[in-house]
Image (cartoon, rainbow, N blue to C red):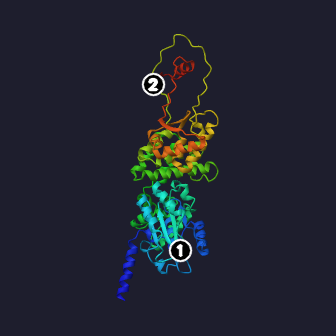
Amino acid sequence: MGSKLSISILVENRLSDLALYRKYRSHDFDAVIGQPHVVDTLQSAIKSGRISHAYLFTGPRGVGKTTVARLLARSLNCTGETKPCGKCNNCKVEISGHLDLIEIDAASNRRIDEIRDLRDKIGLAPAMGRYKVYIIDEVHMLTNEAFNALLKTLEEPPAHAVFILVTTEAHKLPETIISRTQRFNFKPLGEAQLKQGLQHVATEEKIQLEPAALDLLAVAARGSLRDGISMLDQVSAAGKVDTATVRRILGWADNEIIDALSLAIAKQQTAEALSQLDQAVAGGSDIAQVVQQLTEHWRQLLLAKVGVAALSDVSDIADLVEASFISNVIDRLILTAQSPAPRLSLETTLVSLTHTPQQTVRPVQSVKPATEEPTPQPKPQPTVVAIETPTSTSDNVKAGPGQESERWLKALSDVKARNNSLYALLRSCKTDFSDDELVLSCRFGFHRDRIQEPKNRQIIEDALERAFGKSYKVLCQIEPPVAQAEINPASELVSSALKILGGEIVDG
């Protein structure tokens, strides 16, 4: 009796030491949240015995890919009626100790030697179950040579072998690998699903979680249940979880600051925007979180502007901006989120979005009288200065012969499918095509540096070749500053303004 009690206490202590996201990992298909299209298909395949030799699980992080892969691996060797039953010998053994369930981290075992070793051992018959199941996590990290070695195994696998490839970046996998798998796309979880999962964990752990704090955690999780549970684990250490605690620990800025910062952007108030950012940082806000909050705020504004969402939260600035300007703000914020220097990048973005160069007219005490009475001039009409924002990709394309602009748009769509942040960056660049070169003019140096990264330049050149049918070399430069128009002191309009207002022309 004492021995059983000691074992029970040991297991309980072990579970209490686990991080919450590990402790509440789903142990059967019914507990998986937000992926019914995947779970239903896999369960039907298991019941009918139609098992594929290779599966590909892809989607954003923290949505259940590896968990479902482990459940599938257990189900294939489960001897119970409900699969996985959790009671048979194959279900009770931990994956790390199961002879027929092999989990490989491709980030650490990415070389050809590891895949060759796998290929040499795969012919061995299962020791405990019907199948030998290989879960290869982060499979996109394998080298090209390793992929080639894996391809040979996928082409002619033994009847007892099943591969489950897991990745967040399926576009990095060779088409030859993808074509030999059954692909399942995992979706980001909605806020309602995230709240359901977080509330369940909070109830089980007896965490006092305010409804408003639950809402905030669901937004901060950004579709990832694992991230949400990790955040809940972090903030629950402070005791009762309220919105103030969540904001303080996660580094979120107050909604009032985000509203004021967005209003300053809409009103083109550079000093006010930078002042609000300083207040956010002084209050302990994390720059990355501020960028995320701003991006979501302007996303809601864009949806409201095009009539998809209500204007309740963004009504103060809805009438001050156009949809094209909102799109430009979102694109710039997406680029800022990728910067290695977040605060500097956000400050540069705010200045760029709000600052418009102006000429200065300084009043003086007196003006020298004119030697001749000037001829009466008609009353000058007020001059309206329009601030242009890029409304579409084609605005920055320097038109060339044929269908150049249309093909560039096609190339951009290709880039967007592979790297959305690179696509957003290219939208802000000006283009100049020659026979075999594309010159991209960027506003900032870190934009140019980002494009010149070998992997990004390769993505652009591949897209250009597919769109234009020939190779282009991509060059990148900083866009030269636009020279301000000089004031001609002799112009009649300027002379009249100086006489009426009093002043002199100064450089600025």
Q: Which residue is mark 1?
A: 76
Image-quadrant location for residue 109? bottom left
Residue in front for this viewpoint, 19 or 47: 47
Q: Secondary structure at mark 1?
A: helix
Q: Is residue 71 left or right of residue 307?
A: left
Q: Amino acid at mark 1?
A: Leu
| Residue 4 point in image, percent of width and height | 38, 85
Kindly state the secondary structure of the residue where label 2 is placed: loop
Please name the residue that numbered disc 2 is placed on: 507
Against 32, is 388 above or below?
A: above
Q: Are marks 1 and 2 in contact (CB under 8 Å)?
A: no
Q: Nearer the viewer, residue 227 or 320?
A: 227
State which mark lies toward you, 1 or 2.
Answer: 1
Which quadrant is home to the C terminus? top left
Question: Considering depth in this image, is 375 or 486 the residue closer to the camera?
Answer: 486
Query: So how many labels did they put on this image?
Result: 2
**Residue 391 in sight from this viewpoint:** no
Q: How many residues crowd around disc 1 within 10 Å: few (fewer than 14), some, or many (20 or more)?
A: many
Image quadrant of residue 400? top right
Kindly identify the amino acid type of the residue bearing the numbered disc 2: Asp
Extreme residue in the top direction: 371
Q: For the point 48% across and 18% down, which residue is it? A: 367
Q: Earlier in the sequence, mark 1 or mark 2?
A: 1
444, above or below 291, in the image: above
Whole-percent x, y for residue 8 in the image? 39, 82
Q: In this view of the protein, which residue sits in the foreground, 9 or 326?
A: 9
